[in-house]
Amino acid sequence: MTNTVIDKTSIHPSAVIHPSAQIGEGVIIGPNVVIGEDVIIGNGTRVIANAYIEYAEIGENCTISPFSTIGSEPQDLGYKGEKTKVVIGNETIIKENVTIHRGAACGDYTTRVGNKCLLMVGSHVAHNCVLADQVILANLVTLGGHVHVGFGAFVGGMSVFHQNIRIGDMAIISGFSASRQDILPYSKNDGRPSVPRGINVIALKRRGVPLEIRSNINLAFKYLISDDYNTSQAIEKIKAEVPMNEYIENMIEFVQSSKRGLRFKPNKSGHQLSDSEE
């Protein structure tokens, strides 16, 4: 059966599209796709076979893979059918069996995924989560409600995160980790519970952060995880002894604004540190 072509937009005859949906130019909608109420799909986006979308705004040049579900009701017992939604940015890739639930009736009623994100097979983004740009969730990552994930963060497969936590900018978390507490920006993390093991030097290098600044971030990190200081003392030492930059300022603000706290000390194994940033 051939596709129906309407104004450069290709819609398979078996697709079911609600009259309220707004479909951009150059959009490809594959077989057995269901697009429900209040959906906007930006130009050039591909919705491959058997995807389900409702109450969602999806940007341009995205890829929505088979059996992914976007905008279905949140898993929140307090939800009573209020009008909420999902918003996804441009050039984001949603792989097979991903679930992104629309917001519960709190905050801005919205679940958000940024630009150029990659959500791998079977990952789950719960109600009212916020993913910044260039976030990567590997296979089967599970984010509880209201989780905020910072710019460029990478979350390893089969990891689980409690509702209301924050994962900082450019943090990287190894597979099969879990956390009930916030994850420090620019850090490498591992474990159940997950703890920082060092600075994510590779991510900083890839984004052009110079050696001197990376070294100062690493020094600030050493103070934060030191057994010699509590968190408040470590921050005072950083302010007094480490040349400040936007990254260290962001780390300090992140720690001081944390509502769930951060775990700096591992249960058993030590931190992977040396005298240099590497």
Image: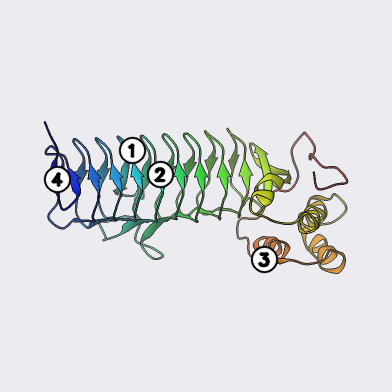
As drawn, the label of residue 5 is: 4
Vertical order, 242 against 222 (above or below): below
- Of labels 2 and 1, earlier in sequence is 1
Q: Kindly identify the amino acid type of the residue bearing the numbered disc 3.
A: Glu
Which amino acid type corresponds to the residue marked 1 in the rendered image?
Answer: Ser
Residue under pointer 1: 65
Are discs 3 and 1 less than 8 Å apart at CB? no
Calculate the distance from the C-alpha at mark 2 to the C-alpha at mark 4. Answer: 24 Å
Q: How far apart are marks 3 and 1 (CA)?
A: 37 Å
Contact (Cβ within 8 Å) of mark 3 with mark 4: no
From the image, state whether disc 3 or disc 2 is nearer to you: 2
Which label belongs to residue 93?
2
Quadrant including the C terminus: top right
Place of residue 219 in the rendered image (x, y in percent of width and height, measured from the top left): 82, 55
User: Which of the two discs, 2 and 4, sits closer to the camera?
Assistant: 4
- Tell me if mark 1 has few (under 14), some (14-19) or many (20+) residues whose alpha carbon lies within 10 angstroms of its own: many
At horizontal 41% and vertical 65% (from top left) the residue drawn is 107
